[in-house]
Amino acid sequence: MYYSFLTRLSALKCKAIIIAGNHDSPSFIDVPKELLSGMDIAVFGIFPGIDKVDQIFVPLKDATDKEVAVVAAIPFLQDRFVRQVGEGEGAKEIAEKIKQGMKSLFAQIGAAVKEKFPTIPTIGMAHLHAQGTEVSDAERDIQIGNQEGIASNDLDQFDYLALGHIHTGQPVIKGKIQYASS
């Protein structure tokens, strides 16, 4: 179904950007990356690291091939990208390190995309749990790594941020950060 959908989408000449979520295998998502790029489908399973952050930037072009916006496609971030493991850490210390790591990483990604593309709108695309979102009956307590969500002001690095993870479409910051619906 996945590949059939992507084939039909490609026939529409529609730019597609795919990021891995917390239930996906990042390696599996990345396998057809090169093949799908020929269909104008950008795939991001594994975050390349902050030293290669420009690899997650996808310029969007108009009919004249002019760059009109850029997407920072941030897949679900594994622990190794957001925190250093410390000996004897408890749940509170881990939760705080995740929050601080996400805040730092988003700040670095936001600064890098604005430095590389200073004159066009920036769009972030990520899969995570932001604080203050409402969960539906289809969800249990959703938390990144079973920890508390990330503060929305720590995610405010882009002109617009599209989020996945929460199944109910809802604004986090109206007109600025939005969850899509499943």
Image (cartoon, grey):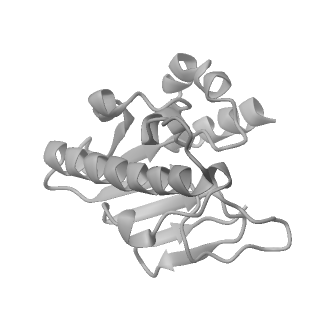
- Residue 88 in sight: yes
- Left or right: 114 as drawn, with respect to 55: left
In this view, 100 is above or below 134: above
Q: Quadrant of residue 138?
A: bottom right
| Camera-side residue of 156 and 151 | 151
The residue depicted at 56 percent of the width and 40 percent of the height is 88
* Name of the residue lying farthest toward the front: 88
- Total number of numbered labels? 0
- Left or right: 116 as drawn, with respect to 126: left
| Camera-side residue of 178 and 82 | 82
Q: Quadrant of residue 2?
A: top right
* Name of the residue lying farthest toward the right: 137
Q: In x, y percent, where is residue 20?
A: 60, 39
Q: In x, y percent, where is residue 152?
A: 44, 70
Indicate the quadrant containing the N terminus: top left, top right, bottom left or bottom right.
top right
| Camera-side residue of 97 and 77 | 97
In this view, 76 is above or below 129: above
The residue depicted at 38 percent of the width and 30 percent of the height is 49
In this view, 5 is above or below 176: above
Q: In x, y percent, where is residue 62?
A: 31, 49
The residue depicted at 55 percent of the width and 44 percent of the height is 89
- Left or right: 2 as drawn, with respect to 82: right
Indicate the quadrant containing the C terminus: top left, top right, bottom left or bottom right.
bottom right
The residue depicted at 37 percent of the width and 46 percent of the height is 72
- Residue 62 in sight: no
- Left or right: 82 as drawn, with respect to 165: left
